[in-house]
Image: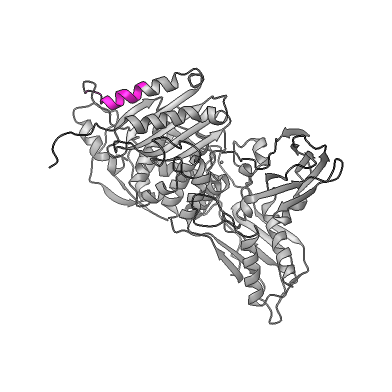
Amino acid sequence: MCLEPYRATSSPASAEGRPYTIILNAGGIPAFAMNRFLARSIGCKIRTTVAIVAATALPFSQAMAARHALLAWRAPAKPAHAAVRPDVVKFRARAQAILGASQAGRSFWGVLVADRDTGETLYALNPDHFFTPASNAKLITTALALAILGPDYRFRTALESQSPLGADGRLAGDLILAGGGDPDLSNRVFPYAGKSEREGPPEKVLAELADAAVARGLREVDGAIVADDSLFPYDPYPAGWSVGDLFFDYGAPVSALDFNDNIVSVTIFPGARAGVAPNVATKPTAAADGIAREIVTGPSGEAPDLAVVRQPGSNFLLLRGIVPAGHAPVKIDLAMIAPARTAALALRQLLEARGVRAHGDIQVRHAPPPHTTASSEPVIAADLAPPAPDPVILAEHSSPPLLESVGLANKISQNLHAELFLRAVGRKKMGVGSSAAGLALERQFMQSAGIADQDVALSDGSGLSRDDLVTPRAVVSLLLYAARQPWGRQFRSTLPIAGVDGTLEDRLRHTPAAGRIEAKTGATDHVRALSGYATTLRGEHLVFAMFRNNDALHGVEATAPLDALATAMIETLGPAPKHGKNR
């Protein structure tokens, strides 16, 4: 048994976790980059010979098949003899001072800043080296989801059965809760408006399904209550996730049937005096039996001392420790170990509260684990089973549009949402809702954006995996590409705004950068990242990627140099204002 200490507070913070057309030319360069490529290639030696043809609109699969070679986009650089802009010189000096400070200088840095309108590189530091991106990986996953699924895509969850509902309200077979990969089977309020708000109990959507089934006439279930998450292969934990991640909300398991973000909120109310057992409440209530507890009330005046222990058996998590008498209730968010089963149990409780008798037990229907090749490519196995007859639909729920869910994922850095987007893309395009299928499509997507396959190596959709690697150039290239897509403005709207909302709400406040940066943050152990879009005080539109790896600092000390770079970027970059008479 291994002890993983967790110091709880009254309000702990969690860790930072459709078919479309692409314009390509025969050389594999996105059309928006072609003019720059031509203008700078005449008279220059290039390593690859390409046939230049008129840009053509092709479906994604045809465009990929038609590529003769992949030339990764490289932002145009000024000729060696060209004068460097004074504002760029000033920014370089400030960047050197920031990155040369004693603590910042011990980390490994990668920075790339470019003009969003022209693609011109303004500043580069290790732009082609690999860095662990942390949650900056969500930039790639959410752009992929918007490109493949579309901003208006909706997930579907159903209450169904293979047996007809009798006139007397009796269902002779099983009642099936069929998951459709919806990340928001919860009480979350949409659209996101600066804060992640919740309204009502976490069982809100399940209660609506139960009400609809009762309104349809359901009174009795002879069979089992079945939680069916077989839409995706059973693979709850992506490669590269740490064992320590699996306890807490940011490491919740992935399932096609997700409930309350697959999170259990545990609130501990200390007893009146030392030695008295505290009261423990869980939300959702159906998850109460999934966590073992050994908690006592301690002497007043002390700090809470709680730990999460992983142990063998059905109760994987053991919460143990002391909460002092007279202390405020202590709240901890933990991962829901068996979300599909918990959802089925909650549904049964809701049905029984509405007078529906359920005679069978709780069952869970998983799909087999995914099959991959030695190189992690998905194996698409032929489905030899005869198709099941269409089920009887007793109730159905549709999610908010994908764009709203993407907005939440990027604003608050929600890991589970990103993992579900990746699997939904795989299911949509390859018929297999596995992470391997999603990652294979992601690689094709990045190549179509002009990014070399060797510049990105991801193992998950959220960035929680320690195996993930990207280059600053790849991220900037993606942001440039996304800005030119029909969904580009919507994509930008999903990013946190400096000093305003999301994971940037409390950063860069009261600085010139407040309200001028839309960017995704990233943070895991020894990693900090910030990448996105910016508009400087002089009106220049920028894209940027900043990575800090091998960093031993925490909290504000870890993010301060990135924020200083961002502020310097806003204050210094941009052509000098023109003087003279207005015309």
Q: Judge whether residue 84 is colored magenta.
A: yes
Position of 505 compared to 60: left or right? right
If the image is split into quadrants, where does the N terminus sit?
top right
| 218 with respect to 77 (left or right) | right
Q: Does residue 397 appear left or right of residue 486 in this picture?
A: right
Find residue 335 and report its horizontal and vertical position in percent.
67, 45
The quarter of the image holding the C terminus is: top left
Q: Residue 522's x, y, as percent? A: 51, 36
Residue shown at the point (32%, 36%) measured from the top left: 537
Residue farthest to the right, as pictured: 275
Q: Is residue 212 above or below residue 482?
A: below
All told, the count of numbered labels is: 0
**Residue 354 on image: x %, y %:** 72, 71
Q: Residue at x 75, y 46 (%)?
A: 268
| Display coloring | one colour
Residue 159 location, quadrant: bottom right
Question: Is residue 450 depicted above or below 353 in this figure?
Answer: above
Report the residue that reaches farthest toward the bottom: 167
Q: Is residue 131 visible?
A: no
- Magenta-highlighted stretch: main secondary structure? helix
Q: In the rendered structure, does residue 163 fall within the stretch colored magenta?
A: no
Is residue 36 visible to us here? Answer: yes
Residue 92 percent location from the top left of the image = 35, 23
Choose between 194 and 207: the one closer to the eye.
194
Magenta highlight range = 83-93
- Tell me where residue 172 sits by quadrant: bottom right
